[in-house]
Image (cartoon, coloured by chain):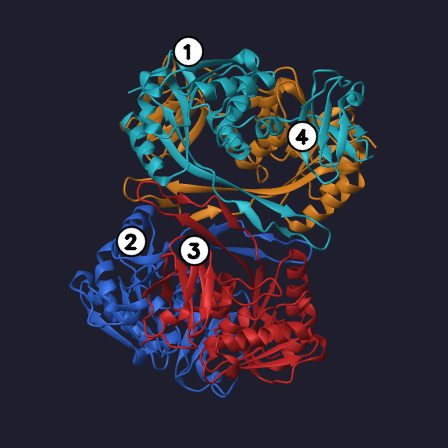
Chain colours: A blue, B red, C cyan, D orange
Amino acid sequence: MKIKSGDYVLLLSADEKTFLVIINEERNFNTHMGNLSLKEAIGKSYGDVISTQLGKPFFLLEPTLEDRMMKVKRLTQIIYPKDAAMILLKTGIHSGSQVIECGIGSGALTIAMASAVFPNGRVYSYDRREEFLVNAERNVGEAGLGAVVEFKLRDVTEGFDEKDVDVVILDLPAPWEGVPSAARSMRGGGRIASISPTFNQVEKTVSSLKKENFVFLETIEVLVRNYLVRTGKTRPYERMVSHTGFLTFGRKVIV
Amino acid sequence: MKIKSGDYVLLLSADEKTFLVIINEERNFNTHMGNLSLKEAIGKSYGDVISTQLGKPFFLLEPTLEDRMMKVKRLTQIIYPKDAAMILLKTGIHSGSQVIECGIGSGALTIAMASAVFPNGRVYSYDRREEFLVNAERNVGEAGLGAVVEFKLRDVTEGFDEKDVDVVILDLPAPWEGVPSAARSMRGGGRIASISPTFNQVEKTVSSLKKENFVFLETIEVLVRNYLVRTGKTRPYERMVSHTGFLTFGRKVIV
Amino acid sequence: MKIKSGDYVLLLSADEKTFLVIINEERNFNTHMGNLSLKEAIGKSYGDVISTQLGKPFFLLEPTLEDRMMKVKRLTQIIYPKDAAMILLKTGIHSGSQVIECGIGSGALTIAMASAVFPNGRVYSYDRREEFLVNAERNVGEAGLGAVVEFKLRDVTEGFDEKDVDVVILDLPAPWEGVPSAARSMRGGGRIASISPTFNQVEKTVSSLKKENFVFLETIEVLVRNYLVRTGKTRPYERMVSHTGFLTFGRKVIV
Amino acid sequence: MKIKSGDYVLLLSADEKTFLVIINEERNFNTHMGNLSLKEAIGKSYGDVISTQLGKPFFLLEPTLEDRMMKVKRLTQIIYPKDAAMILLKTGIHSGSQVIECGIGSGALTIAMASAVFPNGRVYSYDRREEFLVNAERNVGEAGLGAVVEFKLRDVTEGFDEKDVDVVILDLPAPWEGVPSAARSMRGGGRIASISPTFNQVEKTVSSLKKENFVFLETIEVLVRNYLVRTGKTRPYERMVSHTGFLTFGRKVIV
């Protein structure tokens, strides 16, 4: 599997900086370690090396889902991979799932979900802010996942077009406003997830989920601690991201 | 989509106990709240309710990937969903991926990966302990994922049969012993992940990964904090699982 | 410094169980490893050993402040040493300080503060529940600190007798009800601390502190992670206490 | 209690910047909000306000132990107050204690311990680096605690002069080298504490403590999480200090 024009490559420098680029015969890519002629990557394999005009090497890595998410063009704070990973797992999104997302942000979570439902499932992504939809649609398209996502400009309180979806994800300043719309569009046994930064949002969302008869409610926070591993000198890193958001999950029942 | 004989259902009681059962016309299932005749679930939908002979209701929920993992028959400590979710995301396992797993445990992570590579990918699961392979094979089969997993009885130091796989996962007491075998079976740009409980294992594994020229090494720990959300009385839970394992990731390059 | 009748000793067994006892010539103390005749401790030093009739050794340790706190007779959840340590440090309680405490619980924090203000300072401990005051007074007395603590049966809304104290500690279900009383009894530059388990309590307390013109407000949570250290097999413990309470601090200004 | 020349004051600006200053009739202190004439503080009380020539107010706060520690002149990374607080509590240092400290750093922990043993106890502070001793001695002196601390220029392997001390604190790159010296200078039942950033140091220290017959060994890490409390919008801060050091504790027995 050789790299060709149009492929995505994650460039990795010796000092562990990364750049996500599209390979193109005519493109020169400027880095902190000099200029790369991307043409040189064509015909190489992932894992190979190309060098800048200064002789500085860059590995040609295959972008993972996490790389894709972290490198989207951002108009907003993105959903972190740690949170996206937990949302995918706990809502049970898989190949073929039908998913509504409300509050698209920059599309990072959309990419994660689109990758999971591929090729036969579908993600319906709603947002009331046109510029966010436009940016997210481009990000999703660049990840090669445009075929499984529909973008819709609408406020959550107006409801969703779909019925009987498997999963609804709410990433809204007032997630509780989206819960009734979600309930109407979900099938029995379906899963809902909401992400919000404050306790106050969590309280109101949980209260709304109870009112709409969701069960098996759970609110969690995912923390990732990084370690500096060096033989004889291993320790945690001295700083960490200590808060992104709280994740609330529930399941729809028929009452 | 009605529930029928042979389907898996997650039973949820009013006090939030769950049971994963196979629906069967003749089966009675005994709970802490009385007896359930599983026949009654047939023809109902996920989200519906059935009751014990004592009138206690149980919701019929659709098992998610997390439910499947947590309910495997355990001969060992399982890989927790929080860790499995991060492994899937960071290694970029997706529909079609070729994955080697060494150290199968009870098959919980195998189920998560099989679900992700479905239907065209493949998981090759090695273990040196026959009773673990047998138990894991049954767990994977019950999750309906047997078609995408191959089970192989072998010690890691003897190497793997496959070449050019996308991802290798090591869950071994001495993961560093598996690193050379992994390196030989991976394609350029492929991802490796190792999980171990102690710092000493992490140090040796990272040292071995460096020797085999893996790059972009990262060691993390995923912590999940649970919250008790009640209007006006919201707080973290008072106890938590504070350690399962450290996750180490790297990428194969060609040198 | 030899151990004598009436001294406190922390007994430590080989399996690291501890018991806080008063040495007494006639007392036999029953443990999970057999009977100890406490008379044998008399004339020994801290750090020495006595044995049960079954030959099981117990070390005679000197009780630290933490041991004293953890071994009080409990009618309530106690303030954990980790939280008490931070309260002492951040409020700057030291030898000679004048401190009001409202909500005495079982007296564990009272003991920590009394030890810090000893011998010339004073702790004024208020509680509206007589049985708690009685139990705490006994616990404080047994720690040998009764001389620096006054116990008062009163509801916080009735105010405190003292003026110009250095520090006020609120450990109440509704700490915000105690803030105005605290403000009236504190000198300029004095410190206030409040401990509560829920976010909702914290929000109301902070709001009340702002209204009463406290400055330099800070809310923190102290988490302690324990490690299992064994050569070649070191790791965090698998469970931890993940929540006791939030600590809120502020300083009184004159406006 | 009026502020007079020579007193320490913690200046607090409206945007919560703090400065620890000595009041002096002739001193002008330059801040990000303009110039303060410190003479104006004389005759005021803690909690009062003075203003810059631009009319920007600064509160005159009384420095707490934490303020003192955080504001020492630093030649090294200091021991954080969260760790110092736990060391004081778990080693049971109190008024009158005899304490050896080896590895003085910038003297922040020395200040905390000197404050705790005051007025009749004593802290013996050893370091092999003269410039650190000189800096720490000045910091301790400025905190008004010089009378209870002795400073000694010496390497830990040469042993300590004192016998039968209550507590020894090791803050060294190789704490295990100090354990035998500590053991010889402690009384039975005395407590030892060591602080180090890496797991490898912890392993070697614990191994050395076992060899020297210390008991009741415990290794912990103290994490402090900060919260942003605003009515209706309360959440954890997004970044935190996630590692300073591991604390190991033990008690000396006589064998």
Name which residue type carries label 4. Answer: Phe
Q: Position of residue B180 (x, y in %)?
A: 68, 75
Q: Chain of mark 4?
A: C
Q: What SS does tag 3 mark? A: loop
Q: Report how far apart the C-alphas of labels 1 and 4 lie in the structure.
A: 45 Å
Q: Say whether marks 1 and 3 touch (CB < 8 Å).
A: no
Check disc 3 and report the residue beneath it.
B33
Q: Are marks 1 and 3 on the same chain?
A: no
For the N terminus of chain D, the image quarter is top left
Q: Residues within 10 Å of mark 2 (few under 14, many from 20)?
A: some
Instruction: Pick the residue in front: C33 or C255.
Output: C33
Report the mark closest to the observer, 1 or 3: 3
The chain ID associated with circle 1 is D
Q: Residues within 10 Å of mark 3 (few under 14, many from 20)?
A: some
- Is residue D71 shown to the viewer in this render? no
Characterize the local packing of mark 1: few (<14), some (14-19) or many (20 or more) Cα atoms within 10 angstroms.
few
Instruction: Tell me residue B1's x, y (percent).
Output: 31, 77
Q: Quick one: B17 or D18, which is closer to the camera?
A: B17
Quadrant in the picture for residue D137: top right
Dot 2 amino acid type? Lys
Q: Which residue is label 1 attached to?
A: D1
Residue at the disc numbered 4:
C19
